[in-house]
Image (cartoon, rainbow, N blue to C red):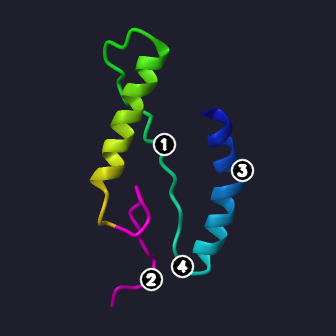
Amino acid sequence: MHAERDQLNRVVFPALEDRLRERRCRLEPIDLRVGVEPGAAQSEQEREQRILKVCLQEIDRTKGLSSIPGAIIHSSKPMF
């Protein structure tokens, strides 16, 4: 999981930020795993499964708010 997160932070997010900046938008990555309590998980695998379940529920909760799964799009363009 750390390798994927590192790749996102080093490569994907900077490239996406550049593209969004051209459209006067910004990227604010959020690690959904921060603050997730794994409860009474007995093993590392159970802990990871619990955290994954909570993260996927949060992604489902944001459906319909943007065309990007798990994302909410904000723009800095003036509204008026």
Above or below, 9 relative to 74:
above
Name the residue that disc number 4 marks.
Answer: 24
User: x, y (%) of residue 9?
Assistant: 65, 49
* Residue drawn 69% across the image and 46% down it: 7
Residue in the image at 37% along x and 43% along y? 56
Q: Residues within 10 Å of mark 3 (few under 14, many from 20)?
A: few
N-term-proximal mark, 3 vs 1? 3
Q: Nearer the viewer, residue 65 or 24?
A: 65
**Residue ID for mark 3:** 10
Separation of residues labelled 2 and 4 (CA atoms) = 6 Å
Q: In the image, which is nearer the foreground, mark 3 or mark 4?
A: 3
Mark 3 or mark 2, which is nearer to you?
3
- Looking at the picture, which amino acid does disc 1 mark? Asp
Q: Are marks 3 and 4 in contact (CB under 8 Å)?
A: no
User: Looking at the image, is mark 4 or mark 1 earlier in the sequence?
Assistant: 4
Q: Determine the residue located farthest toward the bottom in the rendered image.
A: 80
Q: Amino acid at mark 3?
A: Arg
Circle 2 sits on which residue?
77
Which image quarter is the C terminus in? bottom left
Is label 1 in a helix, a strand or a loop? loop
Instruction: From the viewer's perspective, tell me whether residue 10 is left or right of residue 24.
Output: right
What residue would you read off at disc 1?
31
Of the residues shown, which amino acid type is indicated by label 2? Lys
State yes or no: discs 2 and 4 in contact (Cβ < 8 Å).
yes
Q: Which residues are magenta?
A: 66-80
Farthest-out residue, right? 11
Horizontal side, residue 41 vs residue 76: left or right: left
Decide which of 66, 17 is in the foreground and name it: 66
Q: CA distance from mark 3 to mark 1?
A: 15 Å
Image quadrant in which you'd find residue 4: top right
